[in-house]
Image (cartoon, helix red, strand yellow):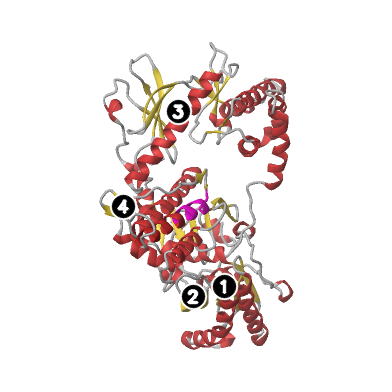
């Protein structure tokens, strides 16, 4: 029975997931032949169909105090502390025997070095203890494959937005090709760091709290830089400017300078959050639209932690509708880093005969999405 | 691009245009129509940037204004300095349109594809002649401090002269991503974009791309330095190593 255990720990979430791919749709080269017939396109996908069964999807998040970010050392310690407990609980909850598991999948990169290594050690340990093959998974490919499966999006342009990554991706000839990306910091990093400056909580996530604050704003849109270059974007200048605005706000409150007003409106954190969101997401929608026009696609799939944001989903939905298409997004169970997506992508790789040898199982902070051979798709 | 999106957005003067608007292409940013401007005898290419309702109206207006102005300024500068580009006939940044001189002719892409379809019977020398003109046109553009930003063989038109198609001068079009830049790096990246686009659009003619660069090299004073920089850009590509 194709069952995989997936371990994810590239950032501050530790995820353990167990997935089952029913054997009725084995991924085989014949699948591509069927798609030439009159079979609807959604059925031409190999086992990346919605028939997968999620046996369990557990997550534990390391939350740092307001005003601070998560440091690699502390995050790795968190993962070490929780991984055994989470794996035990996952096996119990899935009601499976250890013999049922076909492979141990783990995030091999990209991500933060120390947390990645901590989880890779756990994966190697389980692999040797239970005598199961290891499958190293690219974190971004995990997000994309899980998103496609959950939403049923067949061949979308993918916007992958998280704390570490900002990419516009489209599939072509067995690779997920990167059409556009952030040239400096990721969009989620920009949001996280801004949340630190205005000292808001990291629980459940800084981006979520910015979104809630932004809902209270909306009367004024302040002036932030807008940096789109073709299909690429740049966020560091925006962050610097937003930080400057936050300082002006605080100085005004403390009476060190005049209270910041636009007309009669006294500017507050909610206006900064609103402005930041509107600007960042307009940029993301713009590069996605460019990529759609370029490859002639009508579907958009948003994955990654920032993909939970409802305003981003709304803007993207309007853009896609304008082009006669639609947007696909998942909720926080799959958008935010999780173990199930690693298990899912790993099991697809495993079904094509891919194995990661123990001596090749070291992880890497730099692992581009287009390095992975996607041989389970046509 | 989007046949199901209903009636296209048209700004004020063109809703009552005596000449019907023919949609030529719809990109991500703008839609391009063929129509006439002011008199029925003045054919024009009308580039409309429809409002994007998902963007905040303040931001949308700011971006439309910036981009229309940047494009028009680059075109006007080219016209003034003797680079053959479409003339700006009229524009409105509030409404989001710019009317440009209609250039009759075929794109370099179509001309090369046609040359190949005819079995290359006009010969290599003929194609070399065309590519040389492309190189000189880009060189002239760079010499006045304008970087196109999106050079491809479909963004160049071989202007019709009498009946001999494919023999006229090169006219560069679509300055939507143009910047006025004097940096060697920007010019080198401009050439790199063209090189990559040419390779993927005309794989069988790719070996002849050197002719473009040779012609470019002799077209202005700083060209050699730009070509040297191009070698660095090629080495690095657009690819950056991915962190986290």
Q: Name the residue under label 3.
A: B72
Q: What stretch is highlighted in magenta?
A: A233-242
Disc 1 with disc 3 on a shared chain: no
Q: Residue A259 in the image: x percent, y percent?
A: 33, 56
- Please tell me how crowded label 4 is: few (under 14), some (14-19), or many (20+) other residues with Cα within 10 Å: few
How far apart marks 2 and 3 lie (CA) works out to 50 Å
How far apart marks 4 and 3 lie (CA) works out to 35 Å
Disc 1 with disc 2 on a shared chain: yes
Left or right of A228 on screen, residue A76: right
Q: Which chain carries label 2?
A: A
Q: In which quarter of the image is residue A74?
A: bottom right
Q: Residue A77 in the image: x percent, y percent?
A: 58, 81
Q: What element carries label 2?
A: loop
- Please tell me how crowded label 3 is: few (under 14), some (14-19), or many (20+) other residues with Cα within 10 Å: many
Q: Main secondary structure of the magenta part?
A: helix
Q: Name the residue under label 2.
A: A64
Q: In which quarter of the image is residue A254?
A: bottom left
How far apart marks 1 and 4 lie (CA) works out to 37 Å
């Amino acid at each position: 029975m194709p069952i995989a255990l997936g371990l994810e720990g590239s950032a501050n979430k530790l995820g353990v997931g167990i997935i089952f791919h029913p054997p009725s749709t084995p991924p085989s080269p014949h699948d591509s032949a069927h798609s030439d017939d009159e079979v609807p396109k959604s059925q031409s996908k190999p086992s990346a169909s919605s028939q997968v069964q999620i046996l369990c999807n557990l997550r534990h998040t390391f939350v740092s105090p307001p005003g601070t970010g998560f440091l690699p050392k502390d995050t790795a310690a968190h993962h070490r502390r929780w991984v055994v407990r989470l794996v035990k609980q996952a096996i119990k909850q899935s009601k499976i025997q250890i013999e049922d598991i076909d492979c141990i999948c783990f995030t091999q990169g990209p991500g933060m070095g120390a947390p990645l290594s901590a989880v890779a050690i756990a994966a190697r340990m389980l692999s040797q203890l239970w005598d199961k093959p290891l499958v190293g998974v690219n974190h971004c490919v995990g997000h994309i494959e899980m998103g496609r499966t959950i939403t049923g999006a067949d061949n979308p342009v993918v916007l992958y937005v998280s704390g570490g990554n900002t990419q516009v991706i489209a599939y072509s000839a067995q690779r997920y090709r990167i059409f556009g990306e952030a040239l400096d910091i990721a969009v989620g990093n920009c949001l996280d760091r801004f949340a630190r400056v205005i000292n808001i909580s990291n629980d459940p996530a800084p981006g979520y709290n910015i979104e809630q604050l932004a809902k209270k704003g909306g009367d004024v849109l302040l002036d932030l830089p807008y940096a789109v270059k073709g299909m690429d974007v740049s966020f560091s200048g925006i962050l610097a400017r937003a930080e400057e605005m936050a300082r002006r706000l605080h100085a005004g409150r403390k009476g060190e300078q005049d209270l910041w007003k636009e007309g009669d409106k006294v500017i507050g954190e909610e206006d900064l959050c609103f402005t930041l969101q509107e600007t960042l997401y307009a940029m993301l929608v713009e590069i996605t639209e460019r990529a759609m026009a370029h490859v002639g696609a009508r579907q958009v799939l948003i994955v990654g932690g920032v993909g939970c944001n409802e305003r981003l989903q709304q803007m993207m939905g309007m853009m896609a509708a304008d082009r006669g298409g639609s947007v696909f997004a998942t909720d926080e169970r799959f958008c935010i880093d999780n173990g199930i997506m690693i298990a899912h992508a790993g099991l697809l790789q495993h079904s094509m005969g891919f194995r990661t040898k123990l001596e090749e199982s070291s992880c890497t902070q730099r692992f581009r999405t287009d390095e992975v051979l996607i041989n389970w798709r046509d | 691009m989007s046949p199901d999106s209903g009636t296209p957005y048209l700004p004020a003067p063109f809703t009552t245009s005596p000449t019907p608007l023919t949609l030529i292409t719809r990109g991500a940013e703008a839609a391009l129509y063929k129509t006439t401007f002011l008199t029925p005898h003045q054919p024009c290419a009308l580039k409309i940037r429809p409002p994007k309702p998902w963007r905040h109206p303040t931001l949308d207006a700011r971006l439309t204004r910036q981009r229309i102005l940047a494009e028009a300024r680059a075109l006007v500068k080219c016209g003034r300095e003797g680079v053959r580009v479409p003339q700006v006939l009229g524009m409105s940044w509030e409404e989001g349109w710019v009317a440009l001189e209609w250039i009759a002719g075929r794109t370099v892409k179509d001309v090369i594809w046609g040359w190949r379809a005819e079995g290359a019977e006009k010969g290599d020398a003929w194609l070399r002649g065309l590519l040389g003109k492309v190189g000189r046109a880009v060189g002239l553009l760079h010499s006045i401090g304008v970087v196109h930003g999106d050079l491809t063989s479909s963004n160049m038109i071989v202007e019709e002269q009498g009946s001999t198609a494919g023999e006229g001068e090169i006219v560069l079009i679509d300055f939507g991503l143009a910047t006025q830049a004097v940096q060697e790096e920007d010019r080198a990246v401009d050439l790199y974009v063209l090189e990559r686009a040419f390779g993927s659009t005309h794989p069988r003619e790719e070996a002849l791309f050197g002719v473009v660069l040779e012609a470019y090299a002799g077209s202005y004073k700083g060209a050699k330095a730009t070509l040297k920089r191009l070698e660095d850009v090629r080495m690095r590509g657009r690819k950056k190593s991915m962190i986290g």
